[in-house]
């Protein structure tokens, strides 16, 4: 687990409203406390690296060895997906706000999967501080995937769409 994953976990826990979450994995133990009234800081995170003991007997090693192999099995599929996605252009959010696919609730979405787009076409709207900002395409192509659900919060530089430029 790298620092970005830990930071994402902290943000997720803070947004969820949980007061405490503990996560223990093979080599790391994380405790996240939020909303503590006795503390002056709203968020406290404790991260401990726990060394993994190497088993000396052959029989206990077999179950421990099978778990990492099972976890490693999906990795080639993820690698293949990443290779497939690498030929696409990712449209990212230029601001923090709420993502909307439609100009208003009673209108159709700006784009759908399979829609052909041109440079300058409006792809979505992001609301930030009661201002609705049109997000325009910087490339021409075809929408391959919409990566964010309608009415979802988005972060700066978060991927929103995959576009096939061909």
Image (cartoon, grey):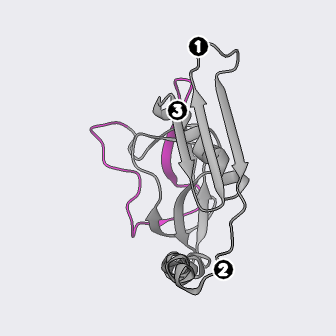
Front one among 104 and 155 = 155
Q: Residues within 10 Å of mark 3 (few under 14, many from 20)?
A: some
The percent coordinates of residue 99 (x first, y second) are 48, 42
Q: Is residue 86 left or right of residue 103?
A: right
Q: Residues within 10 Å of mark 2 (few under 14, many from 20)?
A: few
Marking on residue 6: none
Q: Which residues are magenta?
A: 104-131
Judge whether 123 appears above or below 84 on screen: above
Q: CA distance from mark 1 to mark 3?
A: 13 Å
Q: Is residue 96 left or right of residue 47?
A: left
Q: Residues within 10 Å of mark 1 (few under 14, many from 20)?
A: few
Circle 1: element type: loop
- Residue hosting label 2: 56
Q: Earlier in the sequence, mark 1 or mark 2?
A: 1
Q: Residue at x 30, y 42 (%)?
A: 107
| Residue found farthest to the front | 57
Marking on residue 20: 3
Mark whose residue sits in front, 1 or 2: 2
Magenta-drawn stretch contains 128: yes
The percent coordinates of residue 133 (x first, y second) are 56, 37
- Residue hosting label 1: 37
Q: CA distance from mark 1 to mark 2?
A: 46 Å
Circle 2: element type: loop
Q: CA distance from mark 3 to mark 2?
A: 36 Å
Front one among 27 and 113 = 27
Q: Is residue 124 left or right of residue 105?
A: right
Give the image quarter of residue 146: bottom left
One can see residue 64 in this view: yes
| Residue found farthest to the left | 106
């Amino acid at each position: 687990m790298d620092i970005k994953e830990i930071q994402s976990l902290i943000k997720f826990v803070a947004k969820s409203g949980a007061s405490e979450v503990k996560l223990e994995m093979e080599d790391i133990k994380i405790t996240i406390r939020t909303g503590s009234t006795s503390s002056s800081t709203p968020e406290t995170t404790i991260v401990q690296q726990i060394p993994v003991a190497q088993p000396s007997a052959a029989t206990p090693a077999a179950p421990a060895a099978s778990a990492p192999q099972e976890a490693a099995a999906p990795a080639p599929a993820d690698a293949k997906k990443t290779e497939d996605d690498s030929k696409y252009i990712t449209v990212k959010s230029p601001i923090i706000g709420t993502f909307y696919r439609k100009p208003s609730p009673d209108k159709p979405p700006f784009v759908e999967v399979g829609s052909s787009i041109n440079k300058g076409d409006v792809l979505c709207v992001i609301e930030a501080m009661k201002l609705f900002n049109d997000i325009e395409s910087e490339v021409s192509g075809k929408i391959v995937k919409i990566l964010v659900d309608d009415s979802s919060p988005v972060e700066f530089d978060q991927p929103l769409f995959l576009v096939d430029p061909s």
